[in-house]
Amino acid sequence: MSLLFQFWVGLSSPESRAAGASELFSDTSTSLFSCAISEEHIKQADIIHLHWTSGVLFSPQLFRQLKGKKVVWTFHDMEPFTGGCHYHISCRRYEQQCGQCPMLTASGLNDLSAQGHQIKRELYRHLDLVLASPSAWLAGVAGSSSLFAGMTPSVIPNAHDTAMFCPQDRQALRAEFDIDPNTFVVLAGVESLENPRKNMGCVIEAMDIFAEEHPEVPVELVLFGGGKLNPTVCYTIRYTGSIERQDLVKWYNIADVFVHPSRLDNLSNTLCEAQCCGTPVIAFDAGGSKEAFHDGVTGFISGQTPQELAKVLYAAASSDLGPMRSESRRFALDQFGYETIAGQYTRLYEEHCRKKSTLRDDGSMEQMLMANAMESMLKVVLSISDRHKSAPPQEEDCAAADTPDETTSVNQDINTAQLPDAPLPEKKPERSWFDILLRTVLPNTRRVEHD
């Protein structure tokens, strides 16, 4: 994990993240002092299309290159219009002015969320923005924010590779993984199974209720993603860990249903991918999840408790899912194919981006971003440095302190033998915070060695 992400994680607590159904608060710190894209490429472009911009958007060099350009920005979470939280299940301060943030451990009227909200307000005035969102839910929430009041983002789903994510021979795949053809297989997963927003504990508990109430139905839950949950259950759970896309395609095809129990989401890629493979889905009416499928045709909307989810799982297990599998594939081809989404973005470009931007900057915004970048770099490094100093020694550090390493043993042997002029091993100099700054926060900066 980079220093910047370590810093961001430290701004909130596990409790505040779980309460808000959010895994991250990112402030205006930037990891880019210069843009990763060449200035010549940006200069030639008529349109700049942004996506996930945390740690990038506040780069002074990037701002300099975006000036005078039409900027299409596709939102993938709530961060563009909040003070820094990427999702929050209940807070609506972004509709007026952020501050007293429930995510932050150091919350107040002028906390990092208030500062971030104000810098965004100033920055957006200098950018010629055209907004887009994969879901109508996120587009509506963005439109209700004070930063984008009066703007209506276009709703364009994410595109998916329907050639890779496609139906395969289910029975052959089940034989390959030694799964009985009659077993009702439920698939669920996410990048991190421990993410409180993704709510994997709910599907585990729902499956337990389902298995106890209907012991006549053979069931298996397959979980993919990093981390591991260790519940005590009365049914079979199979963990695949983090897997490559070609293996994920196999599991989508093996499963009878894919369950997405997220407490809040935009338009989940996994819901779309599962249907590309012809697999019906189950999700909550939370955020934009229900927009990803056709309820009753390609999937099922469930209530958000384990008990309600268990009932929907049993309803799916009791249904003939063959027609739903066919409809899921048809729906995905129509909604998420490359040509479909490319056509929608082409029309967006043509509609909004014929006229060149007339916005200009007198230099004040660039100066503000430069000051913010310098301050944020020092803030990140010093925060991580303080955290390391206050952290208790790790086990391996304790072992190193209590048990002599090979070099120490050699030195002790030399001292015991009383050999003259025995050279001591050269001690490596400790890295200063400036050293860390150059090597981590500014990875593209070359160090100048003096004679």
Image (cartoon, helix red, strand yellow):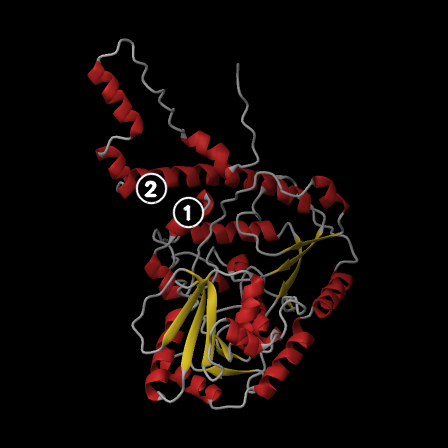
Compared with 420, 402 (above or below) is below
> Between residues 52 and 375, which one lies in front from this camera angle?
52
Q: Who's the residue at 58% across and 72% down the image?
A: 272
Q: Who's the residue at 37% across and 84% down the image?
A: 210
Are there few (<14), some (14-19), or many (20+) residues within 10 Å of tag 2? Answer: few
User: In the image, is 375 to the left or to the right of 213?
Assistant: right
* Element type where label 1 sits in the image: helix
> Between residues 23 and 113, which one lies in front from this camera angle?
23
Residue 382 is labelled as none
Compared with 70, 239 (above or below) is below
User: In the image, is 196 to the left or to the right of 42?
Assistant: left
Query: x and y percent of residue 307 in the render?
Result: 36, 83
Query: x and y percent of residue 357 in the render?
Result: 74, 52
Q: What residue type is labelled 2?
A: Arg
User: In the image, is 359 to the left or to the right of 181?
Assistant: right
Compared with 318, 224 (above or below) is above
Query: x and y percent of residue 216 in the render?
Result: 37, 89
Q: What residue type is labelled 1?
A: Gln
Are there few (<14), some (14-19), or many (20+) residues within 10 Å of tag 1? Answer: some
User: In the image, is 8 to the left or to the right of 147?
Assistant: left
Is residue 394 in sight in this rendering? Answer: no
* Element type where label 2 sits in the image: helix
- Quickly name the residue at label 2: 387
Disc 1 vs disc 2: Cβ atoms closer than 8 Å?
Answer: yes
* Residue 348, image quadrant: bottom right
- Quickly name the residue at label 1: 6
Is residue 38 in sight in this rendering? Answer: yes
